[in-house]
Amino acid sequence: MIRVLFICHGNICRSPMAEFVMKDLVKKAHLEDQFEIASAATSSEEIWGGRGNPVYPPARAKLKEHGIDPGRKRARRTTREDYKYYDYLIGMDYANTYNMKRIYGGDPDGKVSLLLDYCGRTGQEVADPWYTDDFDATWDDVLQGCTALLKYLQRERLGR
């Protein structure tokens, strides 16, 4: 089982988009039984009274535009236990990876990376639609990153 956790600041835009795009790609590749995919936040801003906010409506709309339903996904904050459980902890930007390492107490196993590193865009960040309202740019980044990540995992972990 390959366990992947996508992480952004609030877990309502970029990381849930990555979670559900990756799930869709894995399903289309008939590999659902070999993956566990989720998403989380580095902050608790989108978590109120112990219950996380749902996927931000424009992010939900962008996913649905491409035939992907994020269901009842709600924001949650990443924890130190996530570091132990997941094989890949993938941030959307440098602030995310910095905060992930702070939460996890470092990255001794080298599990933390940026999504766009997998598609040869090393060091680049996924466009943040919270500030730009450009969900198309975010979609393009997420799709490109997740497609490359799946190819990487198929080659490196599944021998395909």
Image (cartoon, helix red, strand yellow):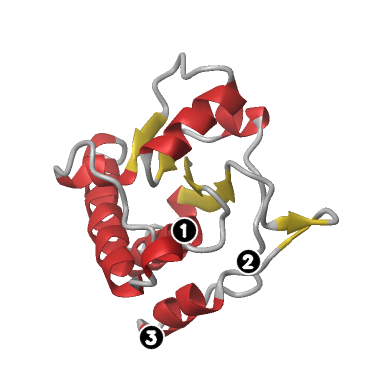
Cα separation between marks 2 and 1? 10 Å
Looking at the picture, how far across and down is residue 125, in whole percent? 29, 46
Q: Is residue 61 rendered to the left or right of residue 114?
A: right
Determine which quarter of the picture holds residue 97: top left
Can you identify the residue that label 3 sits on?
Answer: 65
Name the residue: 46% across, 29% down: 98
Can you identify the residue that label 2 sits on?
Answer: 73
Is residue 16 or residue 158 the one in the foreground?
16
Callout 1–callout 3 Cβ contact below 8 Å: no
Q: Earlier in the sequence, mark 2 or mark 3?
A: 3
Q: Residue extending furthest left? A: 120
Looking at the picture, how far across and down is residue 96, in whole percent? 46, 39
Specify the label residue 130 is tagged with: none
| Label 1 secondary element | helix
Residue 68 seen:
no
Q: How crowded is mark 1: few (under 14 residues within 10 Å), some or many (20 or more)?
A: many
Callout 2–callout 1 Cβ contact below 8 Å: yes
Q: Which amino acid does label 2 sit on?
A: Lys
Cα separation between marks 1 and 3? 16 Å
Q: Which of marks 1 and 3 is nearer the N terminus?
A: 1
Name the residue: 29% across, 74% down: 136
Q: Which amino acid does label 3 sit on?
A: Glu
Name the residue: 26% across, 53% down: 145
Is residue 36 or residue 82 the one in the foreground?
82
Looking at the picture, how far across and down is residue 122, in whole percent? 19, 37
Cα separation between marks 2 and 3? 17 Å
Specify the label residue 19 is tagged with: 1
Determine which quarter of the picture holds residue 65: bottom left
Is residue 131 or residue 39 the one in the foreground?
131
| Label 2 secondary element | loop
Q: Is residue 137 rendered to the left or right of residue 74?
A: left
Q: What residue type is labelled 1?
A: Glu
